[in-house]
Image: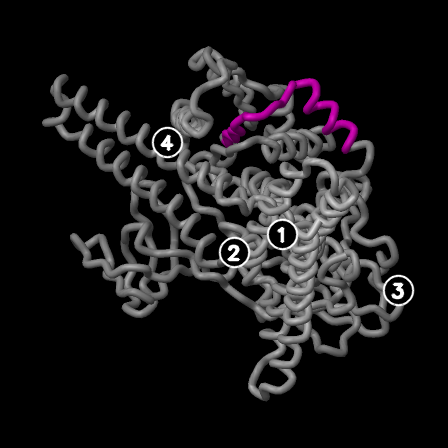
Amino acid sequence: MAAAGTWYVRVLLLLAAVWVVVVFLTVGPLSLVGGGGGSSGAVLVGRLNAAVSQLAELRRQNDELRQMLVDFTEISANAGNDNTATIQKLKHKLAEAPQRLSMSEPSLEYELARRQSRRDADELWRFVRGELTAWRKDDSAKAPPVARRLEKLQDSVRQYHAVIRGDLANLTVADGWETWRRREADQLADLMRRRIDFLQNPPDCATAKKLVCNLNKVCGFGCQLHHVAYCLTVAYGTGRTLVLNSRNWRYNRAGWEQVFQPLSGTCQDAGGRSKAAWPGTADTQVLTLPIIDVVSPRPPYLPLAVPADLADRLARLHGDPSVWFTAQFVRYLMRPQQHLQNDLDAFVKRVQLRNPCVGIHVRRTDKVGTEAAFHPIEEYMQHVHEFYERRQMEAGGGDGSRRCVYLASDDPSVFQDAVNKFPDYTFLGDPSVSKTAAVSSRYTDASLRGVITDIHALSLTDHLVCTFSSQVCRVAYELMQTMHVDAADWFTSLDDIYYYGGQSPHEQTARFAHQPADGSEIALSPGDTVGIAGNHWNGYSKGENRRLKKVGLYPAYKTRDKLRVVEFPRYPEVPLVL
């Protein structure tokens, strides 16, 4: 019984230590900011955000400590019996508690290094594949023995890459922080949803400041959706309720609300005591926003900006914070009406969409020769094969099932071409949807439902192979970010890197020095800012060194993306965590 009493004292001391940590996390930052004189509100908010996350973890640990006390009570009640097993279990939990308390979440440095290792492995593979592909075109490499040697070398390196990616994926699972990542992702997404809800549902529409967005941009659905998402982003940045004018929309004359849920439940009237075109003044009640291509002056809130109060959390959580932020607005806009949700659910069930599955979007018709090059189905399927090879390495072997591909295209002939050339794969999709995407029938209700269906199905897959020059694939990629903790690298683009039409400059920071090998390359020094124009997917990117004002190629692994942090409203009326 004396031993049990000793353990009781230790449990109480540990609970007291937890309480001290709670007090420090909540009171400490406040006192530092209040008495430091030079500390900013941003520092306070950052500390409070961290404190909120840590308090959530402490609540969970407190539940475990309560269970320890229950175990102790059981020991006390059975003092005359053999409680060795229960005591040993309690000892083990107490020994682990301090370590778990100090390592309740990963550091920013760890998460950045983990993701950078994955990117470096990918860029190495792209470089080797690009070099071997170039060598094969040389006459000296066309001799059968040399060609076979090069083929074997490429296969071996591809498998090495798959193994490394598998090891990194297993490291992510084994490091013990998946629960934190899931919780942090859920909390951030919920916070954004509640903030947008607050913005879009003012208590008095007659006096609310508004931003009017006209759905009149002449382009396809993906482009029009991104136009409205740009409007909602600027509304969020200016603290104005967005009013969408979608009457006589090209896809549905009755308007946006016939397909998607209204943007507001309390304020859909664009009226007000004063009106002006962008930018107006701070006192103007109703502003009308032009399309992103001509907006002037350009607001600082345009993609690829991320809000300052969430930047640190997003940088730790997600591989591409700007895409995550944009995705929250896209998801809010694409909340379907119930009849559309029923149709989407029925379609997924009918085609038997399952996981794992790779989504392929093949854009042809009006894009080819104008905005994008022609890519044969074999080029897409090469990356599908690599995805399944990596997945097999991660799982330690295959499950024997046929490999699934969801195929979306605006060219119906692509389906039969894929089935004929790749009989070992199961292709899911509906060729009839492709027919509605033809230029002659594009702006119809059937076409609208078809493209929404394809976007939805593509977003449910485990990897996208597409051309990012197509807004349909970029929308699917954005929605994918709202369904997973971090799906930033769940894509292979055959042309562009991810971009948002009309975005602010996409910039990178040089990690390492680089000396040009020839006139096509540019020099880099650590810390240089580079405006990236594109990734050639062969180990090299193209961009401008802002310091040298020179444009050229550089090894992609020698730079990392630079986060564009902008001060957005912080919406103090909305709690950080419910």
Marks 2 and 3: CB-CB under 8 Å?
no
Circle 4 is placed at which residue position? 162
Q: CA distance from mark 3 to mark 4?
A: 54 Å
Callout 2, which amino acid?
Arg
Whether residue 329 sits left or right of residue 270 in the image: it is: left
Q: Earlier in the sequence, mark 1 or mark 4?
A: 4
Which one is closest to the eye, mark 1 or mark 3? 1
Sequence-wise, the earlier of marks 1 and 2 is 1
Residue 151: image x %, image y %? 23, 23
* Residue at x 70% of width, y 74% of height: 280
CB-based contact (under 8 Å), mark 1 and mark 2: yes
Label 3 sits on what residue type?
Answer: Pro
Q: Residue 203's mark?
A: 3
- Circle 2 is placed at which residue position? 316
For label 4, the crowd category at 10 Å Cα-Cα, with few meaning under 14, some 14 to 19 and many 20 or more, is many
Q: From which residue to which does the magenta span run?
A: 341-363
| Magenta-span inclusion, residue 348 | yes
Secondary structure under tag 1 reads helix
Of labels 2 and 4, earlier in sequence is: 4
- Tell me the number on the disc at residue 184: 1
